[in-house]
Each structure stands twice: as C-alpha cells, then as structure tokens.
C-alpha cells in the first residue's frame, strides 16, 4: 500500500511544473496554489488509502516488526559498500528503462512515419500520436496536441513537461491554455502516472502487472479530478 500511495505525494520533479504554470497564470496566488497542490496530493493519498484498505488490502494487517541496530558512527567502508550496492541496483534495473524511454521519446519526436528527420516537431510521429490522444483531453480544456505531447514526455521525467512546452510553444502557452485549463493541467500533472524511474522501481518490487496497473489507475484518476476542476471552474 505504501508503494501504491507514494506517487500521489508531490516530488521535487513536479516543482518545475508548478513554478512554470503558477508564474504564467497565477502570479499573485503562487504560494496558495502550490500549497493547495501539495495538500490535494496528501488528501487524495489519504482517501485512496481508505479505499485500498477496504478493497485490495481488506482484512487485518500483518504486524511489521523490525529490530533496529544500535546507533553508532558508520564506517567509511560500510557506507561506501551500501552506496555502491544502491547505485549498482539502480543502474542495472531502473536505468535501463530510463534509457530506452529517452531514446524512444527522442525518436518519436525527431522522425515522421517515413522515418525522415523533421525540423518541425508538429510533423513528427509523437505529434501524430498526441493528435490521436488529444480528444480524450478535450473535456479538460487540454485539446492542443502540444500539451498532450508534454504530458507524454512527462512519463520519462516530470521535468520534461516544462522543457517540452518551452520547445513547442515559442510564443508562450497562453495561446493554448486559459487560467481554468491551466488549473486542470496542474491537477492532472499532480496525480497522473509517476515517471519511468518510479514505474521501474514499482515493477522491481511488485511486478509488471502492478506497475501497469498503477500507471492506468493514476491516469484515470487524474483525468477524473482534472475534469471535476474544469467543470467546477466553468460553473463558477
């Protein structure tokens, strides 16, 4: 349950997204908006925890007992060995997934269906895929293919959302987003699928089925919450 709930918490990788849109659309309410996003992530995590407790993890919890070692100053050899084991594990497991995802996104953004390198990313395979997916985001006010492209790149790393937008929107994102749609986008980015590194870690700990389930579940939940924000904002 801890693994499934952790992605709802705002990580440092999401801060550039918050800062970018707050500066562009909510400059006077920046502190309030960013605090609200952190609180929303915590509230959603708590509510989902209650849901999981009565569904996936129904029944009495198994007690967890761990004997803690005596506190003492760690030795340099022990610390170095532990760091190497953690780094080696990351390089062997998560880094392979990150590398493949990076190459895939670069390829899709650089070539068209005829495998010719394109100068305009709007002619790329990634733009075509984003165009197919864009109608799904239309009810959220996010029907622009460039917005969808940035969300796709966010699977690789959440910081990629901002960098992709800066590349695709030369004149600024105001041409494709309103204040309301920006709020919906912020909520969607808060909740939707964790990055590839986190997905790889979930796969390593729980298996591929759980990792795929987390991606699908959080994308659906993010769409629902962003839609609620958009509807409430439209009424108000």
Image: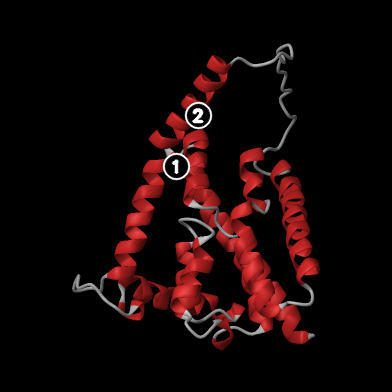
Q: Is residue 100 visible?
A: yes
| Vertical position of residue 164 compared to residue 97: above or below | below
- Residue 37 in the image: state x and y as whole percent: 73, 62
**Residue 113, relative to residue 64: is it above or below?**
below
Quadrant of the snapshot with the N terminus: top right
Q: Which SS class for mark 1?
A: helix
- The furthest residue to the bottom: 175
Judge left or right: residue 150 versus residue 186. Answer: left
Hey, which quadrant is residue 109 in on the image?
bottom left
Q: 122 left or right of 142?
A: left
Of tags 2 and 1, the one toward the viewer is 2
Q: What residue would you read off at disc 2?
A: 86
User: Which of 209 and 234 lies nearest the eye of the viewer?
Assistant: 234
For residue 56, above or below residue 8: above
Disc 2 versus disc 1: distance between alpha carbons? 21 Å
Image position, residue 178 (x, y; %): 64, 85
Q: Pick the residue in front: 6 or 81.
A: 81
**What's the residue at 74%, 64% (across, down)?**
34
Q: Give the number of the disc on residue 116.
A: none
CA neighbours of label 2 inside 10 A, class few (<14), some (14 to 19), many (20+): few
Compare residues 147 and 222 and report the one nearer the observer. Answer: 147
Asked where in the image residue 36 lies, by quadrant, the reply is: bottom right
Mark 2 secondary-structure assignment? helix
Label drawn at residue 208: 1
Q: What residue is shown at x 68% (from left), y 51% (from top)? A: 9
Q: Quadrant of residue 192?
A: bottom right
Residue nearest the observer in this picture, 216 or 39: 39
- Mark 2 or mark 1, which has the lower sequence index? 2
Q: What residue lies at 71% left-to-right and 25% top-to-bottom?
A: 62
């Amino acid at each position: 349950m801890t693994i499934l709930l952790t992605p709802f918490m705002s990580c440092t990788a999401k801060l550039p997204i918050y800062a970018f849109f707050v500066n562009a659309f909510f400059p006077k309410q920046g502190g309030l908006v960013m605090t609200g996003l952190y609180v929303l992530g915590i509230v959603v995590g708590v509510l989902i925890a209650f849901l999981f407790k009565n569904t996936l993890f129904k029944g009495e919890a198994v007690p967890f007992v761990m004997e803690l070692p005596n506190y003492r100053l760690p030795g340099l050899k022990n610390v170095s060995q532990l760091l190497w084991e953690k780094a080696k594990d990351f390089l062997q497991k998560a880094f392979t997934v990150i590398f493949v995802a990076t190459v895939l996104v670069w390829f899709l953004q650089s070539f068209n269906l005829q495998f010719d390198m394109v100068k305009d990313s709007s002619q790329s395979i990634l733009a075509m895929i984003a165009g197919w997916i864009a109608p799904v985001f239309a009810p959220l006010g996010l029907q622009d293919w460039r917005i969808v492209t940035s969300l796709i790149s966010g699977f690789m790393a959440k910081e990629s959302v901002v960098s992709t937008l800066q590349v695709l929107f030369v004149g600024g994102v105001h041409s494709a987003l309103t204040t309301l749609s920006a709020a919906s986008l912020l909520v969607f980015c808060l909740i939707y699928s964790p990055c590839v590194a986190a997905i790889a870690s979930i796969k390593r700990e729980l298996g591929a089925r759980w990792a795929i389930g987390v991606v699908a579940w959080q994308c659906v939940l993010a769409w629902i919450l962003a839609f609620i924000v958009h509807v409430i904002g439209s009424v108000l």
